[in-house]
Structures are given as C-alpha cells and as structure tokens.
Image (cartoon, helix red, strand yellow):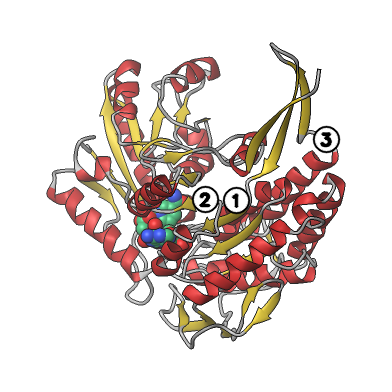
Amino acid sequence: MLTTWWGSILPLDLAEHVMNLMYESLFIGGEWVTPSSSATIDVISPNTEQSIGRVPEALEPDVDAAVVAARKAFDDPTGWANWAPERRANAIEHFAAALDARADEMPIRVSSQNGMPIAISSRVENVMPQTMLRYYADMLRTGEIEFDSERKGVLGRIRVSRRPVGVVGAIVPWNVPQTIGAHKYGPALAMGCTLVIKPSPETVLDAMLFAEAAEEAQLPAGVINIVPGGARTGAYLVEHPGVDKLSFTGSEKAGRWVAETAGRMLRPVTLELGGKAAAIVLDDADLTQNLEGFFMATMLNNGQSCYLGTRVLVPASRYGAVVDIITDFVRSLPVGDSLDPATRIGPLATARQQERVEGYIAKGTAEGARLTTGGGRPRELGWFVDPTVFADVDNHSTIGREEIFGPVLSIIKYTDDDAAVRIANDSPYGLGGTVWTSDVERGLSVASRIDTGVIGINGFLADPAAPFGGTKASGMGRELGPEGLEAYQVLQSTYLPR
Ligand code: NAD
C-alpha cells in the first residue's frame, strides 16, 4: 500500500504498470454487441507514447442501435422512467457499488490514458461518480425530488409534475472523464432518463470499465449505452432524431456547434465549456500558508481543468514577493509518469495538447510576458510540458485571454480591488475563480462582483451539492446540486377539476 501526496491510498507501486487492454464489443442495450464495422480506437499512453489498448469505434449504425435501445428503455410503460423513486434509488446504489468494486482499477485506467497524476485520479475518478450517484439516490429516497406537487392557482387547483426529459445524448471530454460523465448520468438517472454516452477517443478504456459496472449492476437494458468515438460520432449523436436532450462538456468551438445544432432542432442542451478564471490574490493574503490550496485551484490535473484560475491577479504593492512565491512553488512541483504516486504534474493528454500548450508558451514570450520558470519540455519521451509561470502578462494578450489547458500560469499586476475585479471580468469566459485573502468577508465581497458561475475563497474544490457551470462563453445551464436535476426534467401542469 502506498499513500500519495494527496492522501489517497494506492494498492501497489504503479510506475511500472503496463496495460494492454483489447475490447472487441460495444455496450449497447444492456449487452456486449458486435460493432457495425472493424474501425477501432488505439489508445496511446501519454507517458510512453506506446499503445496500451484498443476498443471498437462506434460509428453511425452503432449510435442508431444505442439510441433505439435507450428509446425502448425509456418508453417502456413499466420500465425505468416509470419506476417508483425508491426502486430507482436502489438500482442507482447498486450501480455505485459496482463502481466501488472497480475503485482500484479505475484510476489506473484514467491516468494511463490522459496523464492525470494517479494521486488525483485515485481521489477523484473512483470516488466522485459514486458520491454523485449516492447523492441523487438519497434525494430520490428522501422525497426531496418533488415529482408531483399541487398548488392553489389563480383559477383553481393545479398539479405541477416533473417528468424525465427522455433520451439523453451525453458527450464527455477526456480531462476528468469519469467524474464529468457522472455530472450528466447522475441526475439523468435519478430523473428516470436513459442515456447514450459518448466518451472521448482519448479515454475509452475507463469507459469500458464503467460499462462493465453498469452490466454488473443490472441496470435495465438500454438505460446506459456507451458509444466510444470522436467528433464524427459525437456530431451524429447531436443530430440524431431519437435524442431528446444534449449534455456536452468540451471545447468552446465544438460547444458552439452543438448549441447551434440544438437551436436549429429546438433540442434542450447543457454546455460546460472552457474557462480562463482569475485567481485574485488580495493584498492581505499569505499564499505561503496555503500553497496546496493554490495548486488545487490553479494547476490541478496538469492544468487540464476548465475552472482553474490560470490568470493570477497580484497586487502591485506585493507584486515581486508574490511572483517569487508562486515561481518557487511551481518550480518545485515534481513532474513525472502519471502512475507515479509522487507526480504532481504528469504529461498532457495528447501530442496535440502538448503542441498547443507549447504554442501558447512561445506566444507568451513573443508578446512580451516574462517567463519566470518552465517553458520547456522536461522529457523527450511522453507529452510533457514544464510547469510554467509567466509574469507581467497583459490581460489582453493571447495568453491572458485564451484557455491554454496546460500547466501554465499567467500573472497579471493590478493596482486596487476595483482594478482586480475589472481585470477578472474582462474575459470572454465566466467559469471558476478564486479570491485569496486573510479576511473572508472581504473575499466574499470581491467574489460577489465577479461574473462567474462558480468561485472559491482561499481554495476551490467542486462540491457535488452546489450548482456548477459558467457564464458567457463558458457555457449554458448548470450541473450538480439539486439544480442539476432541472436539466433532465420537463414540466407538465395539470389543471384539476374544480
Ligand atoms: P473537444 O471539444 O474537441 O472534445 C470534447 C468532446 O466533444 C469529445 O468527446 C469529442 O469527441 C467531442 N466532440 C468534438 N467535436 C464534436 C462535435 N462537433 N459534435 C459532438 N461532439 C464533438 O475538445 P478537445 O479537442 O479534446 O480539447 C480541446 C480543448 O477543449 C482543450 O484544450 C480545452 O480548451 C477544451 N476542453 C475543455 C474541457 C472542459 O472540461 N470544459 C474538457 C476538454 C477539453
């Protein structure tokens, strides 16, 4: 047994772990079926650039089959959507238990594919999905989800019912694939929806383990269907006539297309897109007391999380000292194999991400920002990028505006609190953010002026009980919390006889 720097326990030393997983079938309609074609997705390790597995790629006929299965399960008059809440709660809890049974294996699969340090995946990717399932199952059990309520109207009595929206097309990214998936299927299952889930091609081996859990839990056939594939498969699912609701997490570019398509089809959609959040260090903050919290809020998962505060706003009065603290801390972060428990910064998920991040680093230098640490490649093999800090960043420069999605911080100087708020809000995005201060009330006051869907004081850990989502180009709608259920409901009003 090994304990990681974040306190998670690992079953064994994993640095030498070699995975070679081959799947031949797709999980559709509650069984493993032969795919429609011989197309496959090869999974490449970001640590070694070697192949670590293969799964069938779901193409259009497979998506058709998955939507048909989900539709059949949803339309069954005695099926999932019509079960009593207690019965669905039981099934959801069985599913959580089946995921628990895979809690050792899941983080290995995730980290082997996307480079997430195992210390993180073993506290997040094998815990949060079950936490969310149990959170929503509890709400079902305690009657907190009001499926039907009656009220006195203006003209008579009314019943207001919350019905499941139907078949959900859920498109999931590679950065935190299991947890982000649960943001969607957790509330959708609780409401009685059925799902076609499309994982990213970068993270399909964890999706297969997830499918095995769904099979073991004996969720009714068709309630969960998995179609691994890329943009083509995703786009086909988005436009599929048999889908009632879309939930997408990923890039702004793809998200805009999904939203345009959903608009044309008058199909409800929830979008969780990019971010360029501000970490506002107030002049009374002592970052040295909370560097762990600062790391979680700005660089977790190799910088590949949408809510991270990658624009660090530092007051002019303490600028030099704070830049030094951040630079020394970032320089000290151990970079390494994502399966090494000591690793804080692993490789980026893909060669494309590595190139993209390196492109931003080059642009930062070219546009006049001052590199205080990092900027290079720590290893030739694997898709690594040094943890990097730029100081003297102009908020209007490319690295001040665009989401880098890598371990790169941009430090921006400000004069007073009003200026900090102005700079924080001068962004196309509105997801995430933090305020660092020794005075929580002052922090709350600054936080309340930031145009963002989620913000933390002296730290940021997404809580499943709080609505999560963005403003502006960061997306539409909210996931998590009781509010997360609303994305999977339709309302029906019944005028009762007088
Ligand atoms: P992406 O948007 O291309 O992929 C995300 C998911 O959407 C994947 O499952 C992908 O297959 C699917 N997809 C892509 N195009 C689609 C389309 N037209 N229709 C339906 N589905 C489609 O993101 P990416 O290329 O993997 O990453 C690029 C950038 O996206 C990152 O650098 C980052 O800025 C952002 N990103 C954000 C998040 C997030 O959590 N908000 C997650 C991953 C990536």
- N-terminal of the two: label 3 or label 2? 3
* Beta carbon of the mark 1 residue lies under 8 A of ligand 1: no
The quarter holding residue 400 reads: top left
Task: Write down the residue under mark 1.
Answer: 184
Q: CA distance from mark 1 to mark 3?
A: 21 Å
- The location of residue 179, given as percent across then percent down, is 60, 54
The span from disc 1 to disc 2 (Cα, nearest Å) is: 7 Å
Find out whether the residues at labels 3 and 2 contact each other: C-beta distance under 8 Å.
Answer: no
**Which residue is at 40% across, 45% downward?**
263
At 60% from the left edge and 51% from the top edge, which residue is drawn?
Answer: 184
Find residue 340 and report its image quarter. Answer: bottom right
Give the residue type that dot 2 points to.
Ser
Question: Real-space Cα distance between discs 3 and 2?
Answer: 25 Å
Is mark 1 in CB contact (under 8 Å) with mark 2? yes
Q: Nearer the viewer, residue 324 or 414?
A: 414
Q: Which mark is residue 462?
A: none
Quadrant of the image occupied by residue 153: top right
The location of residue 193, given as percent across then percent down, is 67, 52
Q: SS of the residue at dot 1? A: helix
Reply above or below: 317 against 266.
above
Is residue 262 among the parts visible in the rendering? Answer: yes
Q: Residues within 10 Å of mark 3 (few under 14, many from 20)?
A: few
Q: Which residue, given by chain and number where applicable, does mark 3 sit on?
A: 143
* Tag 3 secondary structure: loop
Quarter of the image where the N terminus is located: bottom right
